[in-house]
Image: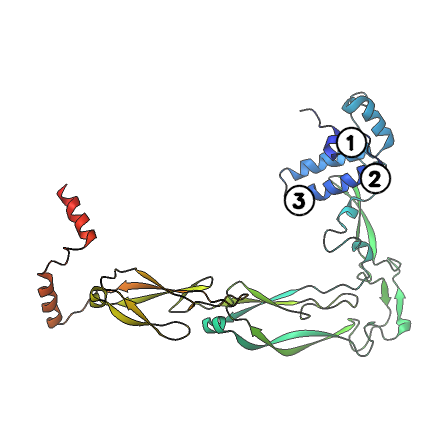
Amino acid sequence: MDKKDYYDVLGIDKGAGDADIKGAYRKLAKKYHPDVSTETNAEAKFKEVQEAYEVLSDSTKRSQYDRFGHQANNGQGFNTSGFGGFDFDINDIFSNFFGGGGQQRNSNRPRKGSDLQKRMNVKFEEAIFGAKKTIKVTAHTECTTCHGTGAHSKKDVKTCTQCHGKGTVIIEQQSLFGRTRSQATCPNCGGSGKQITKKCETCHGEKVLSHTKEIEITIPEGIDTGQQIRLEGYGSKGINGGPSGDLYILFDVRKDPLYERHGDDLIIEVPITFVQAAIGDSIKVPTPYGDVKLKVPAGTQSKTTFRLRGKGAPNVRSKRKGDEHVIIDVVTPNKLSKQQIKLFEQLGKTDLTEDSSIWKRFKSARKK
């Protein structure tokens, strides 16, 4: 297949300037880079974008391409082993992928610690009504001896000899796309730009003191499995004096023997006898908020469902309660006394199917 026009690949006009070419390339490289892209054929598209950029960013190659197209250089195409005439690092494109531009170039800035997650099992009742629990967490506070420097004294803090205070080092390597230059956190100083020649005796150079403490947390009413709450500042310690990360409590709600939960709604199966189903009755139905009376009409069939409004779980955000759905289960007795058997035999001599629509359909089908 013929190659696609380089200008079309980058989505620019033929009169585009250097800034337009570079900007278009940065945008498309972010979109199609194989390490981060979810696009179909991302690797092939990335190579196509890179090839177009390397030609159009070089004034000589661009001039040849504008005159002869892909047949330049006697039909051999262009040598696209470098990054063209703009001389910038492809890794710069991704310096603002996670948290803002320029962060890789400023590794010695204070950074927030990573977030942590902890699972917590709660009872069904605690999830419905909410609760308070005491848990142990790790807190990080600035070292009171060195005041966050990590050194024995101010004289023991020097500029890093490897990165010269930048906090980053440049790594060159050969890759699928040619020779690349990337930035990495300085392994000597950990990105701080400073070296400690003698560490603080209290924190041992960590700059913070870590200790376990007990805190009380509130379990919100209506919390469900998979939902979580955030405890600010109880995650991993910060970097270079930055704040600690956050701790997320992820909940697992234990199953209840009576209720099955579906979002904010509850489902319960309630058994009744043949007699109750046939002649009707008023029964007590359990809810999380106490028993309520439910009128079962005469002739109620098994699996008939009734709804009790506002007797479900509270919504964790709006606090509006869901509903409780009552499924009637007509139970067939498996043990009868002699008197009960006699009564059933007498009842069986009567025609209980005369007014039943399902029996009428069954009898009609048999006659055909």
Q: Give the residue type that dot 1 points to.
A: Asp
Which percent across, then down, holds residue 348? 11, 61
Residue under circle 2?
Answer: 19
Work out which residue is located at the far right of the displayed protein and give it: 155
Q: Earlier in the sequence, mark 1 or mark 3?
A: 1
x and y percentages locating residue 291 in the rendered image: 36, 74
Q: Residues within 10 Å of mark 1 (few under 14, many from 20)?
A: few
* Relative side of 44 to 252, left or right: right
Residue drawn at (84%, 29%), measured in percent from left and top?
61
Separation of residues labelled 1 and 3 (CA atoms): 25 Å
CB of mark 2 within 8 Å of CB of mark 1? no
Spatial CA span between label 3 and label 2: 24 Å
Q: Nearer the viewer, mark 3 or mark 2?
A: 2
Which residue is found at the position 83% from the left and 51% from the top? 170
Which of the two marks, 1 or 3, is nearer to us in this view? 1
Q: Nearer the viewer, residue 47 or 128?
A: 128
Among numbered discs 3 and 2, the one appearing first in the sequence: 2
Residue position for label 3: 37
* Quarter of the figure that contains the C terminus: top left
Tell me where residue 86 appears, x and y as whole percent.
85, 39
Q: Secondary structure at mark 2?
A: helix
Q: Nearer the viewer, residue 38 or 196?
A: 38
Q: Is tag 2's residue or tag 1's residue first in the polypeptide sequence?
A: 1
Disc 3 residue type (three-letter): Ser
Callout 3: few (<14), some (14-19), or many (20+) C-alpha neighbours within 10 Å?
some
Q: Check disc 2 and give the amino acid type.
A: Ala
Asked where in the image residue 282 lies, by quadrant, the reply is bottom left
